[in-house]
Image (cartoon, helix red, strand yellow):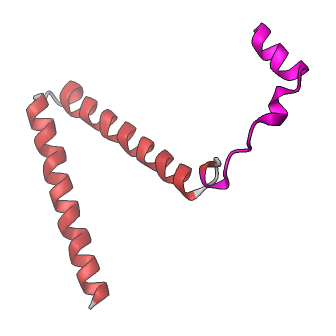
């Protein structure tokens, strides 16, 4: 606490470089990181639902997410081929 008070009262904050706009909270990079975090939390909740509520074994949950990943990759590949042609 004392270090923070000294940081403010001695105006040490003036010598710190401002954060680049690339790393700002509303930048594309940080928005992408936020979206990835939300996706990981959705996957975690989905895994918990499959294993705890439906009684699927852990390996079964991994298989479901693995197959969903493959299917999504195939769909995205097909869409990119159709739109790119």
User: Which residue occupies 56% across, 58% down?
Assistant: 28
Count of labels in the image:
0
Q: Position of residue 2 (x, y in %)?
A: 79, 8
Q: Is residue 70 above or below residue 83?
A: above
Q: Is residue 77 above or below residue 7?
A: below
Q: Does any portion of residue 56 appear in the rendered image?
A: no
The one of 13 and 47 positioned closer to us in this rendering: 13
User: Which residue occupies 15% across, 37% down?
Assistant: 61
Report the magenta stretch's main SS: helix
**Looking at the rendering, which quadrant does residue 55 occupy?**
top left
Q: Position of residue 22 (x, y in %)?
A: 61, 55
User: Which residue occupies 77% across, 16% down?
Assistant: 4
User: Which residue occupies 65% across, 49% down?
Assistant: 24
In the rendered structure, the answer to whether residue 58 lies left or right of residue 35 reads left
Q: Position of residue 7 (x, y in %)?
A: 81, 20
The one of 23 and 32 positioned closer to us in this rendering: 23
* Residue closest to the far bottom: 85
Q: Does any portion of residue 43 appear in the rendered image?
A: yes
Quarter of the figure with the N terminus? top right
The one of 44 and 56 positioned closer to us in this rendering: 44
In the rendered structure, the answer to whether residue 78 lies left or right of residue 25 reads left
Quarter of the figure with the C terminus? bottom left
Q: Which residues are magenta?
A: 1-22
* Residue closest to the far front: 15
């Amino acid at each position: 606490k004392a270090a923070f008070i000294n940081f403010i009262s001695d105006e040490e904050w003036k010598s710190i470089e401002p954060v680049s706009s690339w790393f700002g909270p509303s930048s594309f990079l940080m928005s992408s990181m936020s979206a990835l975090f939300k996706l990981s939390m959705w996957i975690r909740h989905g895994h918990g639902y499959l294993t705890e509520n439906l009684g699927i074994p852990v390996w079964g949950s991994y298989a479901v997410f693995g197959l969903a990943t493959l299917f999504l990759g195939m769909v995205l590949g097909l869409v990119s081929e159709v739109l790119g042609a």
